[in-house]
Amino acid sequence: MENQFNRILNQWLQEVADGCHEIATNLTYNMDMDFYVFQSNVSFQPDLMIIGSNPGGRKSYTSMNQERARDRRTANDLGISDHNQFLVNDGWGSMRSLCELFSGSILRPVFEKAVITNIAYFNTGSFQELRKRINQGGREALQFCVKKNLELIRILCPQHIVLMGNPACDNLMKYFDKPLKSLLMTLSGGLNLIRETTLNGIPTYCIHHPSLNYKFNTGENQRLKRATFETIFLDK
């Protein structure tokens, strides 16, 4: 089973590396942007798969290749590591609230072994910058990455999925098994903190992006979210 998983995953990685390279080097596009997929280890049937927006960074694919003295990114250079990179890099600044959310004796072990990726694999300072290129290769890039994310979910078979922010939720919504419903709301104002559905039968939760929406990712709202996820993973 492990050999079969590795074979299928390696084929997927090759397809992603080739597809992203073709998009980044297509002269008819404005997509000379570096790319990578993972910010964690990758495993079969992880307790948690996290999908965010896209990697931060403003370096072009051309300049990154020059800096690293390489012709291109390969299937072996898509971000797979031995550790959760958010924990190793002290939350990467604005994403510290993600580490705070998945803290404590119940959630931290889950977070340490979570598979972490993004709905788009191309680097920009924000997802809005990718949207600005939607008619310059951005549409093709996003469609390709969404397709590969759906394939990855089928390959990994995670036990739970967390989608961080609107880009991940909106681009996967048409693949949900059922409409989103509210799981947790703020005590004041009745605003959603966690919405739930299933994707391929997998419990899937949508939350505000940890690097944005400060009020939803701190204080009482953060405590409520943590308590809800503790219940979810304690009962797994």
Image (tube, rainbow, N blue to C red):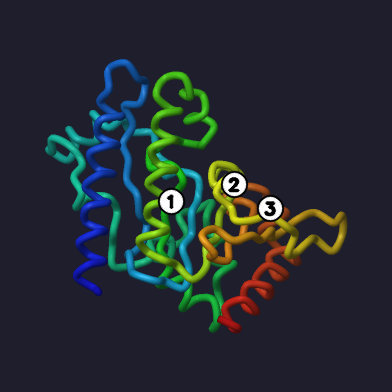
**Mark pair 3, 2: CA separation:** 8 Å
Q: Amino acid at mark 1?
A: Leu
* Residue of label 3: 179
Residue density around tag 2, few if under 14, some if 14–19, many if 20 or more, within 10 Å: some
Q: Amino acid at mark 3?
A: Pro
Q: Assign a secondary structure to mark 3.
A: loop
- The first of marks 1 and 2 along the sequence is 1
**Mark pair 1, 2: CA separation:** 12 Å
- Mark number, residue 173: 2
In the depicted view, which residue is nearer to us: 89 or 207? 207
In the depicted view, which residue is nearer to us: 156 or 201? 201
Task: Name the spot of residue 130 as percent of width and height, x first.
Answer: 47, 30
* Residue of label 1: 150
- The first of marks 3 and 1 along the sequence is 1
Quarter of image, res 189: bottom right
Instruction: From the viewer's perspective, tell me whether residue 65 is left or right of residue 149.
Output: left
